[in-house]
Amino acid sequence: MRNLHPAISFGYFAFVILITVVFLHPVMLGISLVSSLLYAIYLNGIKSLRFTLLFLVPMMLLAAIINPLFNHLGNTVLFTVANIQITLESTLYGLATAAMLAAVILWFSCYNKIMTSDKFIYLFGRIIPAISLIISMALRFIPRYIAQIKKISYAQRAIGRDVGSGRIIDRLRSGADVLSIMVTWALENGVDTADSMRSRGYGLKGRSAYSLYQPNSRDKTLAAFSLYLAVLVIAGIALRLVLISYFPLIELNHLSVSALFIYLAFLLLCLFPLLLDGFEELKWRFSRSRI
Amino acid sequence: MALFTVKDLSFSYPQQSTPALTAIDLTVEAGGFVVLCGRSGCGKSTLLRHLKTVLTPHGTREGEVLFGDRPLAQVELREQSSRIGFVLQSPDNQIVTDKVWHELAFGLESLGCDTATIRLRVAEMASFFGIQEWYHKDVNELSGGQKQLLNLAAVMVMQPDVLVLDEPTAQLDPIAAAEFLNQLKKINDETGTTIILAEQRLEVVLPLADKVVVLVDGRILAAGDVGAVSANLNANGSAMLKAFPTATRVFLAAENLTGSTRSPAATCPITIREGRNWLKRQLAQQLEQPLTQQLEELLPTAQSQAVALDSPTHIPYSIPVPPTAPIPAHIPAHRESQRDSQIDSPSNANAIVAGAREVWFRYDRKGEDILRGLTLEVRESELFCLLGGNGTGKSTTLGVLAGLRKPYRGKVWIEKHAGSSNPLSAVSSIKPTAARGGLCLLPQDSQTVFTEKTIRDDLLTMFSDPKSEVSLAITDNIAMLLEIDTLLDRHPFDVSAGEQQRAALAKVLLREPQVLLLDEPTKGLDAAFKEQLAAILVKLKSQSVSILMVSHDIEFCAAHADRCAMLFDGAIISQGPRRQFFNNNNFYTTAANRMSRGLIDDIVTAEDILERLSAPTPETQG
């Protein structure tokens, strides 16, 4: 997945997250949640399991409890607490929303691992070249300014002006001093940067955006395959082979062969990164063991 | 055909009465390697910036610059962008993007090249410069030397006909600088790219150059090959000669001493190897026919020439004679006794004012040890130089001594009673220093020291009562001491590097330190500013301030230190009085020592060689 073309990775995550958010089908949510958890564990190790247990599960429970307290839609009243009707539909809807939130968070943690800043810049640089340069420059200069602020405060301590201690008023004052000199410093040094940019032709007409990524045949095959799965899922939803509606009464599709087929397509799609990475890892080990 | 022709170019910045450039006539042949040298502020940058339209400063201008046969201003910007490459001084400021590969592609993106072209050109350059190992890295992870190589490569991808470089190695350590300059030589040799380079490191650069241009106050003083230019400067008695390679200086000074011009200028030695060969011949000749007799006849000339070699005349104020002043060549009797007293450096007898004992330090709990049992001591009124390569822990040592970093083992101490004779201690209105009593560190980057809009305001922040008469008086006093009294109302960023450093030093001195710690104080300074700094250090020593400086600058330490030490792998490997220290090192020593090693003993500076050459030499080994 890591060395897949950024456009495919981005499209993949966008699609899976979109389906998860928009289509709160319990089976599909389950598939999405489990796959995202597995892939997150694969990418980030056991700490994403700990994160899920410590943070996501309580959050899910909270969402599931809170939703029916404020959402009174639905016809099946379970019980009444302090004049609040708790309905079956809103409880289930709350559970689904909670699962959706958890799955989306997990998908985003995978997304962050796969879609590094340069891939993102590359993708959006193709659309608006100026954007990619601005993001790239921000990523260059923000760390640089932070480093310079640290250097200044170190220097001030070195010459005996401690900016991090003393009365609050003094600290604020010296902090403001450091910031003001930082602005001057940034402008002063920015002149050089501007010279360097203009000297290398910045501002000429027809700027292009270079990237390290070039689609290869593997990218194309995998893109076609995942696109096929995505089309199946979309078709299934459009043809109401799979459907869910929570209010006023819960309406769920029957477990037909065609529905099973769509579930399978979505399962394959959700497990696609894990299968891909796992397969390539196996292949690598196998080829290595033969050496 | 000449690549650049500068015809009678004069230029003045707006609202400046003195012109920055006056009647510059210069041709640069295609494929040449031209070195432009001169003091800071002599107009080097201004001249170089006239070689590219987008960088040309605003002001009044006469004369013209031709690129090939067309006036430069008529050459399209797109063509200029790719054909004229420009590299500036600061490695950091020139980098625009966050990734190495993106930086390499930046120029070609500007030209609107397609992906395939950029891919090929970037790949070629990355291979040529050996960048492929850090191709995917963030630029923040690179060292200064790597950053500057990246800047060079990022210009080279545009396949320029000419590279213009404005002191590209000023911010680099000697090793990185040599690597950078060798890379330039490689470009020049292997691609025929013309190089126009402004540089202070003449010792390294002149052997590479086929044309040298010396700029003084915006005028060309001399231009031509190294031999001719140095002979020319010598004839004029120019102070610029001081920055030339040791071999050349010794050769010219020896010629001056004998009063003859036996050798034609073409044989003028530039490198250490050429210097050694020349020295061998010289010593062989001397065995046959001692020069002493001739010298005695020429005594008055010899004396004045010996002074010219060290040329304190270009320092426009009087200073106490430093212990390293050239020993008059014609008084052999005194010479030996003086040298002995230098070996037993006076500071050896002085009281210890601060030190560290078996200090261990690391930045992270799990990180590597940076200091491994460092032990050192600083004595009263001495200049103690700590030399060493990159990453040996020099700056960390200063941080630990200054109390900014806490060692996890070992002890750092300062004698409280020492330095009571500090005449600045009459000052009472300085804010009390928190516990650090009299030990101050001047960081490497002077710009990080300032926080105010003018140098005067900045100095006044050191007082608890900045508006009192006393504070103002002390400020003026210290400004006089450091020769920044005329700059007090300027913005600290608007003055030159040397002046910035002195302003920063003034701020530190307001703390009345007994021990002053300096981090690479000579970095980026030209020869004249270095002399000025040395003079100020002497003044401070005479006022009982002890100075510990860390440096890469072997020649400076060899000329001005009382004691030197070499730091390696977080501990001191060798230390001793200056002369003894440099004689014990084989490689990590001065050019003069390397030039004379095995030929003459006990040589540290160019003056030493000269002195021996002119004296009867029973101790030479031939």
Image: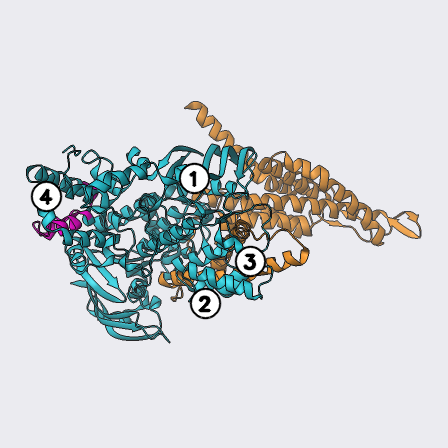
Chain colours: A orange, B cyan
Q: Earlier in the sequence, mark 3 or mark 1?
A: 1
Q: Please name the residue that numbered disc 2 is placed on.
A: B490
The three-letter amino acid code for the residue at tag 3 is Met
Identify which residue, B141 or A219, lies in the foreground. B141
Q: Earlier in the sequence, mark 1 or mark 2?
A: 1
Left/right of residue B171 with respect to residue B163 in the rendered view: right
Q: Earlier in the sequence, mark 3 or mark 4?
A: 4
Q: Secondary structure at mark 1?
A: loop
Q: Earlier in the sequence, mark 2 or mark 4?
A: 4
* Res B591 quadrant in image: top left
> Residue B42: x percent and y percent?
30, 64
> Residue B620: x percent and y percent?
16, 34
Q: Please name the residue that numbered disc 4 is placed on.
A: B291
Q: Please name the residue that numbered disc 3 is placed on.
A: B462
Q: Earlier in the sequence, mark 4 or mark 1?
A: 4
Query: Label 2 to label 4, Cα distance in Å?
Result: 54 Å
* Res A288 quadrant in image: top left
Task: Check the residue under mark 1 and report the chain it is in.
Answer: B
